[in-house]
Image (cartoon, helix red, strand yellow):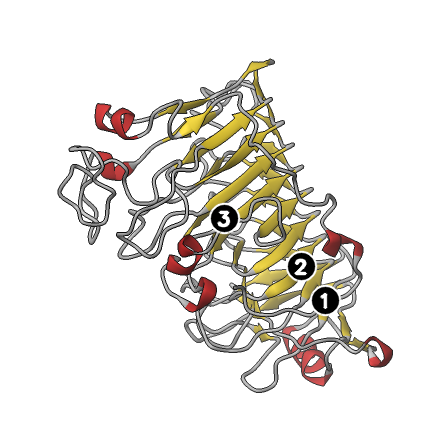
Amino acid sequence: MWIACTALAATPATARTVAAASCSQGDVQAAVAAASDGDTVAVPPGAATWRTGEENRPAVVISRRGREKQITLKGAGMGKTVITDATGPQCFQTVIKSSEQGIYSDVQEKAFRITGFTFRGAGGDVLISLAGYTNWRIDHCCFENSGRSLWVSGFGLIDHCIFDKKHNGQSIFVSHRDFAGKQYGDGSWSSPLKLGTDRAVYIEDCTFKYYAEKPNAALDGCNGARIVFRHNTLIDAHVASHGTESGGRNRSIRSYEIYANRWHLGQQKQRWTAIFLRGGTGVIFDNKVTGPYGSFVLATNYRSSAAYAPWGKCDGSSQWDGNEEPNGYPAIDQIGRSTDSGPGTRQELDPLREWNNTLHGKDADIAVSGTGAVHVHIKAGRDFLNDTPRPGYVPYAYPHPSAREDTAMPGKRPK
């Protein structure tokens, strides 16, 4: 894993470029330390290996407590400035990180931008992690050979990146665990659904290429994650999500807008589905899937078939579920459920919708995956609607407005 970042509102009139003497870890850290709000740290062409010997510590820190900065960290371009990860296997022992501490901390991060690098992993965990403020951007970077490449939160943009996954790991993991000042994603679930707005992590115009026979997901999320995934190309890859059975009190993904993407699978490979969902709601439209994928979208609910602490099993015995029927339906955070007043309170019914998608050149729909109990809890026409656009839905501006900016934009904590 790798770098840590945070920043304040820029003052364009005083913004300057601070040139790192080389792309070595020490020279980049020195340039970051010399930079002020609004500055660009320019890292020259070259190759370097970055290390850290401490668990949960990054190789390079952009923001330290009381000295948070809004800066752009700019390499010379993909394949020109190449950073190799030798930081260690521990979680969040990263190359680039958005704070000195863990992924969830009280450091008051500011907006930032990272652009123009190739990051090479060794199959371990996260390369870049950030803890969650608005208007950050990671663009025009290549991520090679890493386990999980990015762990992100807040509201920001990942665009024009390449994820070349010779090692089998997730490319991007999204978590809104501390949304609205609450934990476990509770704040995201109790806040209104805001599809078609900037209140999400946007991933657009990226390419994902996987090599493993049974690959991990190109995209995943939990803890109330809000994601927009659009105009991407996926080669031998799929997209997934975690539900409210992801370990301890962690909540399901909250919402997703998946559209205008292209999947392709080589004829010598097999994938059971292009998209695998375990909770939440949203819209899926204008996607095209080619190659021997077994299905387009599969929806499931693990708690229909097994108990997961502290939630238990959705069978009418758990206080966390809606229990509108003897079988426990609806399960907390299941497909088609939306805003609540806290875990265990009533959740709005807001069906997942898909339209205008194709698989093998033919109309593609959502299907249910799992035991008979799953099919009782997730039903077409109630919890999801095939071939049915969402009334009043308008996608957010494309390209994302941040893609038109050359510097990091002012940010704040998500609400």
Q: Is residue 293 visible?
A: yes
Q: Please, what secondary structure does the residue beneath circle 1 have?
A: loop
According to the picture, the residue beneath numbered tag 1 turns out to be: 408
Q: Please, what secondary structure does the residue beneath circle 2 have?
A: strand
**Residue 152 at x, y = what percent?**
53, 58
According to the picture, the residue beneath numbered tag 3 turns out to be: 193
The amino acid pointed to by label 2 is: Arg
Distance in Å between CA atoms under marks 2 and 1: 7 Å
* Side (left or right) of 262 relative to 240: right
Q: Please, what secondary structure does the residue beneath circle 3 have?
A: loop
- Compared with 22, 172 (above or below) is above
* Side (left or right) of 384 relative to 412: left
Location of residue 32 (image quadrant): bottom right
First of labels 2, 1 by sequence position: 2
Residue that extends furthest to the bottom in the rendered view of this protein: 66
Q: Are marks 2 and 1 in contact (CB under 8 Å)?
A: yes
The amino acid pointed to by label 3 is: Leu
The amino acid pointed to by label 1 is: Ala
